[in-house]
Image (cartoon, coloured by chain):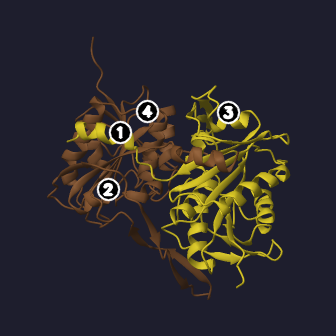
Chain colours: A yellow, B brown
Amino acid sequence: MEEKRPLILISNDDGITAPGLRVLVEEMSKLGEVVVVAPDSPQSAMGHAITVTQPLRLKENYIFEGIKAFECSGTPADCVKLALDKICTRRPDIMVSGINHGPNYSINVIYSGTMSAAVEAAVDGVQAIGFSLNDYSASANFEYCRPFVKRIASTILQNPLPYGTLLNVNIPRTEHIKGIRICRQASAKYAENFDERTDPAGRTYYWMTGKFINMDADDNETDLWAIDNDYVSVVPTKFDLTSNSVIQHLKHLLP
Amino acid sequence: MEEKRPLILISNDDGITAPGLRVLVEEMSKLGEVVVVAPDSPQSAMGHAITVTQPLRLKENYIFEGIKAFECSGTPADCVKLALDKICTRRPDIMVSGINHGPNYSINVIYSGTMSAAVEAAVDGVQAIGFSLNDYSASANFEYCRPFVKRIASTILQNPLPYGTLLNVNIPRTEHIKGIRICRQASAKYAENFDERTDPAGRTYYWMTGKFINMDADDNETDLWAIDNDYVSVVPTKFDLTSNSVIQHLKHLLP
């Protein structure tokens, strides 16, 4: 009996033409059959938005030779929902998202379109990994990410995670990577979030900006520490947001 | 020395004219000084999207008599970021979001604009609660939510939650509420997500739809059970997504 190659679904939030996506497509093609459904335009910071008040479009795209690929008018989460329902003819063995042009460590995970695509797959019971490179520059080099992307995806294909869990992988901006660290996400927040300006008509407007504050500095178990120290960070991430430790406390407060 | 009344920041995802917001404003005015910063248009299912590629606008709005209120061109998370940075002259004692026109129980929490506003406040260290009514109908009755909204917000004002935690409150569609239940979120997902149609030009398009599948049916510790049984569900929710239980397992797989 012929064994089928693993089916690997790929999406991202930077859009179907992003260089990080191409690296992911090439590496995943070594591990199995690849299907791409990615946004037709950049969708950064879309969080877990889905499109409910507009219809969605899918269009076949031939930029990856020999690979079935579609561009989608929706968000990263929309892409994965559509792929699983309408494009994949069998269930994917794994879904990978990225490689994002910029990091998604620490609290950034909740704003991340890259991770929302992976979370969407994981909720549906598909193994999932979000990959991000800690480099916003236009000349960001995704090449040295290749062995890490392949090794981590291959490991999860062979050793599936329990339902409810996926991986958030961040790759540091250095070709001299020391290795992989399994981490928790660092506790962090943003302060001084807006730059206030006046438009030519005299009206005020605001640009989002903000100073990142790491409240876990010096803790070497966090993703921020790993990246700052030239390690690839791997954070096992979940989508059940229940704070179980607070349940008993609340039962006394709100009987 | 005069003691200041608590400062209560309010937002939502249905927009500044939503009836659920008005109920929240009226009830919170009984507990403290209210400031409203809400989207200028509906923002349902925006997840934790933030606006990074467009500037944002704020406009004062006088629909709530005697209440400082602004409409914002951004997402619910944008509203809270702007409110904390540019509108609130002191730190809010609590931030409440809603009352959403429709439920945000179980896995819906990750798609919810209502909850993303509350999460944004909680990340910044402000006590936060998202309120939702399990009723999508145009004639949804928010009146009977009043005592529950007031009681829960008042309890949290007097007994702050630990950093990293907020509340997700869902109110059932019945005036005969049996009480409050502290719950975990039910494990659930959507299936058969899209309705495929053809437009007048012969091109395919897709509407998001989907059948909700409760994988925790019969478990009476979940929010879905509570709502189905006429209780208000209160789920303590967190925004650190690390799956701590999987960290050791992964350390063996990816040494």
Task: Locate residue B215, reporting x and y percent.
Answer: 39, 66
Q: Mark 2 — residue? A: B222
**Picture quadrant of residue B159:** top left
Disc nearer the start of the sequence (4/2): 4
| Spatial separation of the CA atoms under disc 4 and disc 2 | 23 Å
Q: Mark 3 — residue? A: A225
Q: Inspect this view and state whether residue B152 appears.
A: yes
Q: Give the residue type at disc 3.
A: Trp
Q: Inspect this view and state whether residue B52 appears.
A: no
Say few, some or many: other residues with alpha carbon within 10 Å of mark 4 (under 14 / 14 to 19 / 20 or more). Answer: few
Q: Give the residue type at disc 2.
A: Thr
Pointer 3 and pointer 4 on the same chain:
no
Disc nearer the start of the sequence (1/3): 3
Numbered disc in front, either 4 or 2: 2
Relative to B248, is B205 above or below? below
Q: Mark 4 — residue? A: B163
Q: Which of these two is toward me, B61 or B7? A: B7
**Picture quadrant of residue A253:** top left
The circle drawn on residue A246 is 1
Query: Under tag 2, what secondary structure?
Result: loop
Q: Quadrant of the N terminus of chain B?
A: top left
Query: Under tag 1, what secondary structure?
Result: helix
Q: Give the residue type at disc 1.
A: Val
| Spatial separation of the CA atoms under disc 1 and disc 3 | 28 Å
Please say if the residues under marks 1 and 4 sit with CB atoms less than 8 Å apart: no
